Image: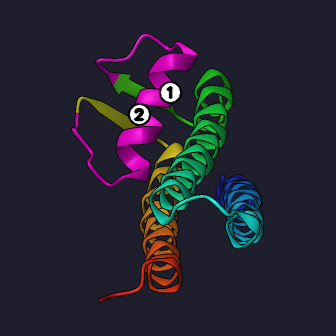
Amino acid sequence: MFLDAHISLITITIINILIVAIVVFIHHEALSRLSGVLSRMRQSRHFRMSIAVFGILTAHAVQVWIFAFAYFVMHHADEWGHLAGNFTGSFLDCVYFSFATFTTVGYGDIEPLGDLRFLTGIEGLTGLVLITWSASFLFVEMQRYWPTR
């Protein structure tokens, strides 16, 4: 029993690390590519910033869906816990839960049980860091393309 608990903890830790690594890589690539696109654009600063915001929102949505896929798989596996409450087990319920967790809104209508709880904690932390990174990126881009008068 003791060994099984440690193997489960190691497995869940590896899964969490892989998911975080994937979404951080996606975020880095999205911001790098957006920076390159914005620097080549000749449209108005308003249009450039709109593209930046939509690009970042798209990146965040992709990241949320990656976490949602992990919730879906883990929920339907027997050994990793499950999601309970106002939850049908559908993929879209997992997406909803992931959005609430990523943005740290946490409505509380769906509750993680078992080892799945570790992923929710790391998603909240990851979402906070990536959203802050996005805000910093937009601030720098606004300074670059939105001169004060």
Q: Which residue is drawn at 58% across and 34% down?
A: 68
Q: Is residue 62 above or below residue 20?
A: above
Q: Where residue 51 sits: x, y (%)?
A: 57, 52
Report which quarter residue 124 is drawn in. Answer: bottom left
Q: Name the residue under label 1.
A: 94
Report which quarter residue 17 is drawn in. Answer: bottom right
Report which quarter residue 20 is drawn in. Answer: bottom right
Q: Which residue is drawn at 49% across and 65% down?
A: 45
Q: Which of 23 and 77 is in front in this view?
A: 23
C-alpha span from label 2 to label 1:
5 Å
The image's mark for residue 97 is 2
Element carrying mark 2: helix
The image's mark for residue 110 is none
Q: Nearer the viewer, residue 136 or 6?
A: 136
| Mark 1: amino acid | Cys
Residue neighbourhood size for the residue with mark 2, other residues' Cα within 10 Å, grouped as few (<14), some (14–19), many (≥20): many
Q: Residues at badges 2 and 1 in contact (C-beta under 8 Å)?
A: yes
Number of numbered discs overlaid on the protein picture: 2
In the displayed orientation, state which residue is furthest to the bottom.
149
